[in-house]
Image (cartoon, helix red, strand yellow):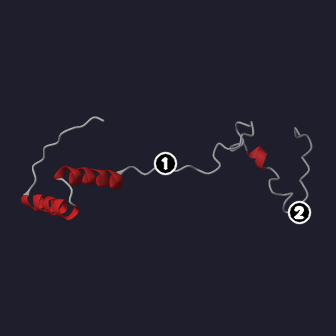
């Protein structure tokens, strides 16, 4: 594990807080600072990317299924108990 060294100037208030934390927890100043860095990182970490359920799960093989309105003709008619419309004369069905 690669280790690094950090030097920081603390104002008197921050130094007092650090000293209190060292005394309260029985940690070294380095342990308190490492824990603080971990907490800041966890608090400010970017939110995980949310997945949309079902996206990419099914492949109909039709590349324009979502955009071509002809695929929506009579959609839901069977489940609503309505008879299917008959194609107009001269249509390509």
- State whether residue 17 is above or below residue 33: below
Question: Which quadrant does the N terminus fall into?
Answer: top left
- State whether residue 92 is above or below residue 18: above
Mark 1 touching mark 2, by CB under 8 A? no
Tell me which numbered mark, 1 or 2, is placed earlier along the sequence.
1
* Residue 49 numbered tag: 1
Q: Which residue is mark 2?
A: 81
Locate residue 4, reporting x and y percent: 21, 38
Q: Residue at x 75, y 40 (%)?
A: 60
Secondary structure at badge 2 equals: loop
Secondary structure at badge 1 equals: loop
* Residue 41 numbered tag: none
Q: Residue furthest front?
A: 26
Is 68 on the left or on the right of 84, as rendered?
A: left
- State whether residue 61 is above or below residue 41: above
Q: Residues within 10 Å of mark 1 (few under 14, many from 20)?
A: few
Locate residue 14, reporting x and y percent: 13, 59
**Badge nearest the viewer, 1 or 2:** 1
Q: Residue at x 10, y 53 (%)?
A: 10
Where on the picture, by quarter, is residue 67?
A: top right
**Foreground of the two, 46 or 16:** 16
Is 38 on the left or on the right of 93, as rendered?
A: left
């Amino acid at each position: 594990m690669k280790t690094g060294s950090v030097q920081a100037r603390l104002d008197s208030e921050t130094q007092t807080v650090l000293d209190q934390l060292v005394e309260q927890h029985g940690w070294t100043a380095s342990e308190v600072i490492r824990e603080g860095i971990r907490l800041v990182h966890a608090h400010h970490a970017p939110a995980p990317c949310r997945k949309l359920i079902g996206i990419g799960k099914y492949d109909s093989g039709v590349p324009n299924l979502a955009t071509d309105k002809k695929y929506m003709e009579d959609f839901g008619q069977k489940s609503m108990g309505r008879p299917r419309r008959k194609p107009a004369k001269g249509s390509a069905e």
